[in-house]
Image: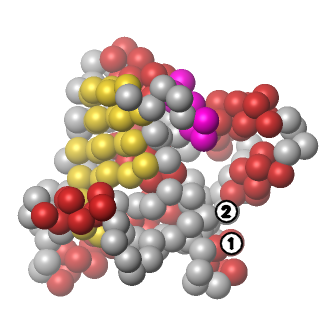
Amino acid sequence: LIVYPHGGPRARDFYDFDFIAQFMATRGYAVLQPQFRGSVGFGKAHEDAGKGEWGGKIQMDLQDGIAALAALGDIDASRVCVVGASFGGYSALAGAALYPDTYRCAVAIAPVADLGMLVTEQGRINGRKDAGIEDLRDQLGAATKDKLLAQSPAKHAGAVRIPVLMIHGDQDTVVPLTHSRLMADELKKAGKPHELIVL
């Protein structure tokens, strides 16, 4: 199984062609695209339930999806990889670092690796009064510094026990390359298997 959480997290997957999901399926993988809490289009309560749950209940939703498919006998729960881009990339890194027994590998495309750095960067780039930074703070649930540290995969690289692949563009203006470089540095320090491909 490949768990393939969408970006956002205020986004959703639709019943339309997704070239990445389709590519993975053509390689023989089952692909789960979960509409975890925080996803839009399922009511305000569902969307609001994701606030402050980066690395928390959102990750539990991914694990619940794995458990449901395993209970149906559709997948082997010991052979699961997590793949995602942007927030989905964050979920891939969070899966590897915060829930190391769940996955066999992680692929993070343009991931967020450090939530405190994300808030600081967004404020510096767009200004502290920018609507985007206010939206990010809202999504993070006005998290404390300690909670941001607890939910940041780069701060828990030592817990990673699976191979991690990161792919990041050097001109990314949404999630700067500094996130993947930081995660790669932390994984290297911890002696963990990883690769960073910079496009």
Q: Is residue 175 magenta?
A: yes
Q: Which mark is on residue 134?
A: none
Q: Is residue 55 left or right of residue 118?
A: left
Location of residue 12 with respect to 116 vertically, above or below: below
Q: Is residue 64 magenta?
A: no
Judged by its main secondary structure, the magenta piece is: loop
Q: Tell me the SS state at disc 2.
A: loop
Mark 1–mark 2 CB contact (< 8 Å):
yes
Q: Is residue 89 left or right of residue 37?
A: left
Quadrant including the C terminus: top left
Q: In percent of the image, x 35 and y 34: which residue is there?
A: 166
Residue 173 at what x, y percent from top left? 61, 35
Question: On the image, numbered disc 1 is attached to which residue?
Answer: 48
Quadrant including the N terminus: bottom left
Q: Which three-letter amino acid code belongs to the residue tagged 2?
A: Lys
Question: On the image, numbered disc 2 is attached to which residue?
Answer: 51
Q: Which residues are magenta?
A: 173-179
Q: In percent of the image, x 87 and y 38: which residue is there?
A: 128
Q: Which three-letter amino acid code belongs to the residue tagged 1?
A: Asp
Q: In percent of the image, x 17 and y 65: which residue is there?
A: 25
